[in-house]
Amino acid sequence: MNDSLRLVCEAVDTLDIDGIRDLVQRCLEEGHTPEEIIEHGIGKGLDLVGKKFEAGEYFLADLVMAGEVVKEVMPVLKERMNPVDAPRRQKVILATVEGDIHEIGKNIVGIILSANGYEVVDLGVDVSAGRILQAVKETGAGIVGLSVLLSTMVGGIRTVVEEAKAHGIRDRIKIVIGGACTSRALCEEMGADAYGENAMDALRIVNGFSENA
Amino acid sequence: MHPVERVLRTFEGKETDRVPAFCAMVEGRTYNEVLGKPLVSQERLLVNPVATFALDRWGPLLTKLVFQHEVTRSMEKRIKAQVELGFDAVWAILDETFIVTDHRTMVRFTGSRYNLQPDGYGNMTYMYREPCFKTREDFLEWPYWPDADDVAHSAYRFFSAMMKKYGHRACLFGQASAYGIQESLLWAVGFERLPLWIRRERDLVKRFIEINEELCLKTNMALLDAGVKVVIQTDDFAFKSGPIMNPRLIDELFGPSYRRIIKAVHDRNGKYVLHSCGDNTLLFDTFISWGVDGLHAYETTSNVDIFKEKELHGDKVTIIGGVGVDYLLTDRSRDEEVVREVRRLIARLGPSGRFIISPVHSLSTIPAHKLRVMVDAVRTYGRYPLSPALEEDAA
């Protein structure tokens, strides 16, 4: 890998939010395209962050920080990207189910997915099944991430699943669940497609669904 | 043995007559089931056109005059209900951290905003909505910073009265208008902003920690002066899958404050319990190095292994918790399932002491009946020496 791209990768990996702007600027001045910088610098750096998280070396706050590091340079890169060459980004809808207003986990997932190139449509908290499905229709998103913390609100997942069936769109969306009271067993019970234990798990699941789309 | 003696001896690793039971607080539904429903529910009191109009207009003014009075009354009901349920130790909390800004909104004086809403059982509760400090200016212009001395005076008054009324019946674990330093910071700036603030707004983070340390220190001293023997502090350092941030960073940022606070409590012969939700496996050594006497909650829905922790740290710290609130202490469980779990926990965590059985959390869904079943089971099966029959449960 080119030295400048390697330094961008290292900056993401070491969460160097103060240094990344200059490093990306240097890459651009050397003639690297924004797509190269994203793929070979930022993307590789995020892979390393994910590995460190899974190895227990990084923690949730570090994942958020990695997202911030990427956010620091994305506007500069987007500005220079040719719209024709820009990669088509898969849309993912995120929402905390109706009756629950907890959002930290959902927001972390949003940061990680955005940093990895997904277009996240965050509907916020306490979102009804109707609003989620309307957003699916409007955006054409193929993946819906549902967050729930309160055990009393898990029924909200089933409502989304059932209403998606009723609207005839269940087959064209994948429903991923996560949050403090969720589990693999709950995922099966509610008829969702996948359960993510943490943000990196969610990314892996979404990557899998995207590849098979 | 008197409950207070039973609890204090447990913290000291001394022999007791049985495993003590601690109640991790009760919410509106539960205390109304124990003490009887009020004539007018909190929900009716606060969600009607007159009240909403008044709160929207004069919320901050009415907080001190009306709202705080109702909250403090409910705080006493919580204590009374826990004592009536027969627990050896009860979570006694005074919360004067709130300012109502309109009928749907409350802010904590340390910079976080909450929805004020019905709990589904006729009572009012609150849920975290958002941070108040999104920029440096928000922090620097914050109008609600507390006067720690005023808060401490109020805590002294409340706890002196509570000790007189209930201190001879149960061991009060006291907490007064001071939440955890780390969790207060997290609520005030928001989780998504927290890592960035720690990196870029270090001076404000330091100032925030100082303000909250002073609040904790002064209220804790007031509690001890009022006769409370055990101070409890909530500070959720972990999520379901592990610590929120690097344990080294947690120790660097918050360790010095907690060491000073805990030393001050110990200097007055008090005991210090830290409540932290989630999987704190990677943090227990840090907490113990700060000097805590007891740790609560070993949340059953997280990945923490309470039995492993007993093996690793059971000789250094009192383990408090074990009984799940996601199923066991709900309307859905059967009484015999609660009894079976109590037996299993006592069998595996009771030997060699330093164990206080407790629900892992308070929740508005906990029925009083299930807490009674839990306490009865502890009284039946928790006597030392433990019955060999319990070993079957441990297997």
Image (tube, coloured by chain):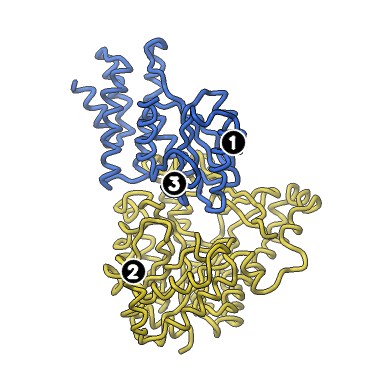
Chain colours: A blue, B yellow
- Residue receiving disc 2: B291
SS for tag 2?
loop
Q: Residues within 10 Å of mark 1 (few under 14, many from 20)?
A: some
Quote the CA–CA distance across marks 1 and 2: 53 Å
* Up-down relation of residue B135 to residue B301 (above or below): above
- Residue receiving disc 1: A163
- For the C terminus of chain A, the quadrant is top left
**In this rendering, the label closer to the viewer, 1 or 2:** 1
Q: Residues within 10 Å of mark 2 (few under 14, many from 20)?
A: many
Labels 2 & 3 near each other (Cβ < 8 A): no
Say which label, 2 or 3, has the lower sequence index: 3
At label 2, the amino acid type is Gly
Chain of the residue under label 1: A
Rendered location of residue A37, percent (x, y): 29, 21
At label 3, the amino acid type is Leu
Observer-nearest residue: A140 or B138? Answer: A140
Rendered location of residue B380, percent (x, y): 46, 83
- For the N terminus of chain A, the quadrant is top left
B238 displayed left or right of A43:
right
